[in-house]
Image (cartoon, rainbow, N blue to C red):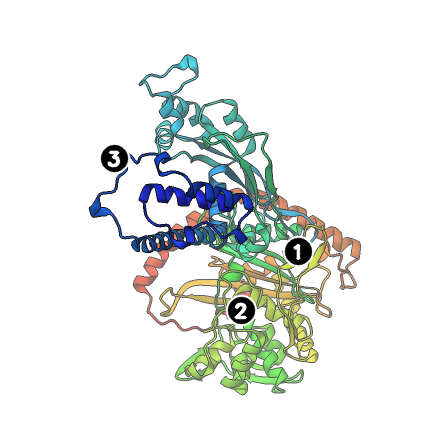
Amino acid sequence: MRAVLVQVFAIALALLGRVSRPSWLRAPSRSATTRADGRLARLVARWPARLRPARPVWLATPDRWRLPVGTARRRSALLMAAYLVVLTVLAGRLVQVQAVNAQTYAERGDSQSMRAIDLPAQRGRIIDRNGAVLTTTVDAAAIYTDPTTYDRFADDGKIDRDAGEVSRRDVAIALAPVLGRSVDDLVDVLSSEGRFTYLARQLKWDVGEEVMALDLPGIHRVVEPSRRYPGGTLASSLIGITDIDGVGLEGLEALANDELTGEPGQLRVERAASGNMDIASADRELEPSVPGTDMVLTIDRDLQAQAEAAATDAMVDNRADGASVLVMDATTGEILAAASVPGVDPSNRNGTDRDDRRARYFTDAFEPGSVQKAVTIAAAWEEGLIDGDTVMEVPPTWTVGGRTWTEPFGATGELHVSEVIERSSNIGTMMIADELGEEKLDEWLRRFGYGQPTGVGFPGESAGLLLPHEQWSGTSLPTIAIGHGVAVSLVQLASFYQTLANDGVAIQPSILRGTVGQDGRLEPAATPDSRSVVSADTARSVRTLMQGVVDGEHGTGKNAAVVGYDVAGKTGTADKPRADGRGYTNQTTAVFVGMAPVDEPELVVAVMVDEPETIYGGTAAAPTFSRVMGQALADRDVVPGTPQQGIDDALAGAREREAASVAASRSRAARAAEAARERTAERRARRSADDATKPADRDATATDGGESDEST
């Protein structure tokens, strides 16, 4: 067949061009063709010239265009070269389409014939240590529209209502009361360009049902995930918030966003050539979404609720700007409760103040005041500078670097080291720090964790502030020893005291207990780091000293006592630095940090009240410590250690206190917001007056002297 085609092509060239055939167009030799091919060639050669059809005039080639016989070969070569060039280009294009960019063109083709529907993944839940759900995801409705629908209705300039045609304003009037938007606003949205625009998102499902029941043309609904909080505002500052698309913005939602998000899926359906209709009978490709991982916290929901109620009462009772409470397991470092007020409603992300959303116990640093004295004494004890027999002669004044401190409430004279802690003696602590020296005090504070994050990993966690001792001034040693000129967060304070409660071993604080995957099994979190800071003997000795703060004759923390349990802790009060760092204001932070039972502590509770009118830690913070610690010990069934207190009486008393506190907190919660606004206005006015009259540098003498019984 190939030989016949070659001969026909050669005859055509001979008839039309009257040129001698090039050798590559001549008939193949007999050895290369069949016998039939040879007969056909001879027949053509014998064809009489008279029988050949006359060539039409219009096909005659002008002489000026006629090529010499030798030119035919060149023309054939040029034709072949052109053919090869075209073939090469086509082959290259074929390789590009089929091999190099195959995926791109396949996707482009699919985009014209397939429609992809994204299937969002179910965001993981956040649950407490006992399985109680703190936040979860439910189906919500998103309402969208195709604005071009109404252009088609008005092609003739008229609306045929009998035919189901409506105007944009008709639709807006029907939707406005359901969506809670103005008619004019909806008309603007319905008039936007394009074929897709949202009218509302994150609606409750029943609201979406109500919208679809209106049966309005051009109005559609799609399912989207929405975050829900069964506990309302419970642990809101810890959990954080997500944006409207479910991406974590703050708190644990941001910290564990990748694990919570999961993997979205996709449904691919074939659509008609017009692009406006899916083909129901066509095959569909489903790639299911993978739900996010559930995060199990160390938080106990019930204890969290009790801590938040106690913090709210502390803020209201002391007419303070805010309050924070943190409860930590003394042996594991797990955070069992983290409360901060004022709180916020996480479901109303746009209607909350960002300052109120922050987790103050992690993010806010403040001068700790006298609670630091326990750390200073622990460092000196470990260095062998003091022990249980140490007695000091404490003078009424102490001068260092040209500055003189005065002991405000008579904690002077011959004092045992236990009395230095019990009576919160400033000068006594300064004398101990003077024996340590700047370099050693700086070293021990950093060993406890000052000036560095705890490692809990919470977004925005403060590292506190501790300057290198090379940058200390002449008065830094005495002031830092009593908790001034240094800043810590509440979780850092709790961690320092957890070290003393755990026989000198520091455990990295943690808020994540583990994760739960698709198999429903708990995968425990990594074991937190631990390190030895001081000896067990030193830790126990300092705990014994701090017990006198609560039950001693001159203790500054008597309000922290818990019926039936031996408690150790320390009060702290510190003036707040000015915002520009120049001197101090008249406002204070009141703190109490402690542990119980003293012999084998199970819990550490830290309380900070911000700018209380009652000023002192022993008055503003210690009662809140007592309440939270008592409830937590009862919940954990810790046996009371005081002999005269029966177990049943202690538990009954704890339950009564809990019931009373819950009732009181409910009545006070309604007044909290209004009280906070009033306090803010009052303090702004007072600060303005202070700024106008107060000198820039205020002596940072320990206001903790005011924590004695005489002051309260």
> Are dots 2 and 1 in contact, CB under 8 Å?
no
Observer able to see residue 137: yes
Taking 373 as reference, is 490 above or below it? above
Residue kind at label 1, given as amino acid type? Thr
Q: Nearer the viewer, residue 356 or 45?
A: 45
> Are dots 1 and 3 in contact, CB under 8 Å?
no
User: In x, y percent, where is residue 677?
Assistant: 43, 47
Query: SS at mark 3?
Result: helix
Q: In which quarter of the image is the C terminus?
A: bottom right
Residue kind at label 3, given as amino acid type? Val
Taking 75 as reference, is 700 above or below it? below
Query: SS at mark 1?
Result: strand
Q: How far apart are marks 2 and 1 (CA)?
A: 24 Å
Number of dots carrying numbers? 3
Q: Residues within 10 Å of mark 3 (few under 14, many from 20)?
A: few
The answer to which of marks 1 and 3 sits earlier in the sequence is 3
Q: How crowded is mark 2: few (under 14 residues within 10 Å), some or many (20 or more)?
A: some
- Identify the mark at residue 453; answer none if there is no mark: 2
Residue kind at label 2, given as amino acid type? Pro
Q: How crowded is mark 1: few (under 14 residues within 10 Å), some or many (20 or more)?
A: many
User: In x, y percent, where is residue 707?
Assistant: 54, 66
Q: Distance between the residues labelled 3 and 2?
A: 102 Å
Toward the top, the furthest residue is 162
Toward the left, the furthest residue is 64
Observer able to see residue 554: no
The answer to which of marks 2 and 1 sits earlier in the sequence is 2
Residue labelled with disc 3:
57
Taking 296 as reference, is 697 above or below it? below
Determine the image quadrant of residue 575: bottom left
Task: Using residue 519 as the reference point, say whether residue 120 is left or right of it.
Answer: left
Query: SS at mark 2?
Result: loop
Residue labelled with disc 1:
515
